[in-house]
Image: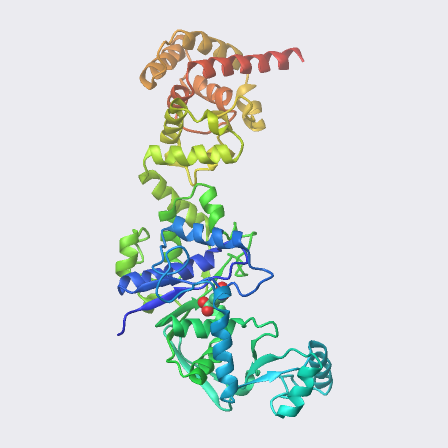
Amino acid sequence: MSKVRVRFAPSPTGFLHLGGARTALFNWAFARKHEGVFVLRIEDTDVVRSTEESVDVILESLEWLGLFWDEGPKVGGEYGPYFQSERLHLYRQYAEKLVQEGLAYFCYCTPQELEERRQATLAAGKSWRYDRKCYLLTPREREKLENAGRKPVIRFAIPPGHTTFQDMLRGEVSFENQELDDFVIMKSDGIPTYNFACVVDDALMQITHVIRGDDHISNTPRQVLLYKALGFPCPQFAHIPMILGKDRTRLSKRHGSPSVTYYRDQGYLPEAMLNYLARLSWATGEEEKEIFTREEIIARFSLDQVTKHAAVFDLDKLNWMNGVYLRQASNASLASLLEEILVRNGKVRREDLTPSFRAYCEQVVAIMKDRLRYVAQLVEEGEYFFSEDFPFDEEAVRGVLFEEGTGEILRASLVRLQKVDDFTVPLLEEAIREEANRLGVKAARLIHPLRVAVSGKRVGPGLFELLAVLGKGRVLFRIERALRMLEERSSG
Ligand code: GLU
């Protein structure tokens, strides 16, 4: 096999969604496995919808996932440029070649004329396909239209017959050519359409395998015909299944965000995301094994094992998997992620990120890691770590704090904790257990209201760990505040 060259070819019209990321991942893994080349090409021919921000987000998302490309934006390469907007001369050149060879032709029909004919055909009960009106124009007729100021598009003349290709996942796929229209390859403004630009680029960039979403499968016969017409060898195709939401509709916001950067910003770990995406549609043959390192993905990846049916995005599973990776991550790295999220959410100012705040974040992470699915959860559900103004669960207040006798218990705990100089887990535990003995109650009778007082919640990390991390100042202040809440209640 000649050297494997694959590409990921996003259109920069928005963020990188999970489906795109997985397409990139399969291409990357295939290239790495076969010691080939992974090309990144930006398909920015949609001038209206393509934006630079979107290019940046796509590059950032790929870099975050560690899907580094060997050729493309930033890194360059022998087959550049890698932005389609910088390759317009090439498309023009190849389109003209097709016209000269009679394989493509200028079409002067206006959208309005096309629409009128389409309507008339449909009204006659027939299905509409471009009627080749301009196929047989004489040079004189063309000249007349040109002189009238009409700017032509270039259409590809679909030959008769049928088109077949071997899909690496689905086997033989066949289309009747008459189903395909004489589609436009160059628009009147000199911009190529997707199918044409894609073929010219894949051919010139010597792509050996086109691995892409199966939403493109109906484009492939058109592309195969173009390869033939242009005299280029056809690459191999592998159309990978879509990622759907749990209700089997197209992945959208309703299923959890479809954008890669959302997960980055929520404090998911890139290795976890990569692992999760890899397992979507990839039956590894070891069904028990879920956790795959980057190296394992590369070593084991095979297109033969990619399933044909759509994959279902399961946020719970991603959360579980991310939890596994979070527990393996160092507290320092998680603390740094946490700080970024706090700053981004306006919970902490960047200038307040001191070494002691970092140390505090590390402690928070250390006691919360086991119950964490993603780091931003600490901001969403752990306000009590970072602010005195945290919410109290109504049910916890009613059921635990306002329980008969809690006032005395909290007051006694306060007095006892005031005497603990060093808020370490063993000393705190000893103090609370002794106080429980003295009061003749179970330790839990102290632990539950203390937890609500310092965190507003019924559940959370171990209480002694929590008190130790929050520190004496915060803890005493919060117990006093809870006592005031109790007093206000009994006086009000
Ligand atoms: N720009 C196309 C897309 O984003 C590329 C499809 C392909 O890989 O051929 O869907």
Q: What colour scheme governs how the chains and residues are painted in the rendered image of this protein?
A: rainbow
Please give left or right for residue 198 compared with residue 35 in the image: right
Label total for image: 0
Measured as percent of width and height from the top left, residue 70 is found at 34, 59
Between 106 and 472, the one nearer to me in the picture: 106
In the image, residue 375 sits, relative to residue 205, either above or below, namely: above
Q: Of 233 and 118, which appears nearest the observer? A: 233
Could one spot residue 217 in this view of the protein? no
> Who's the residue at 40% across and 45% down the image?
320
Report x, y in % for residue 176: 51, 86
Q: Report the quarter where the N terminus lies.
A: bottom left
The residue depicted at 41 percent of the width and 24 percent of the height is: 354
**Which residue is at 27% across, 73% downward?**
2
Expressed as whole percent of the image width and height from the top left, the position of residue 102 reads 52, 89
Q: Quadrant of residue 183?
A: bottom right
When asked about the image quadrant of residue 8, the answer is bottom left
| Residue 253: x %, y % from top left | 56, 52
Nearer to me, 248 or 161: 161
Residue 419 appearing in the image: yes
Give the vertical position of 397 relative to 241 (above or below): above
Give me the residue at 54% from left, 72% from top. 193
Q: Is residue 128 left or right of residue 347?
A: right
67 lies above or below 485: below
In the picture, which quadrant includes the C terminus? Answer: top right
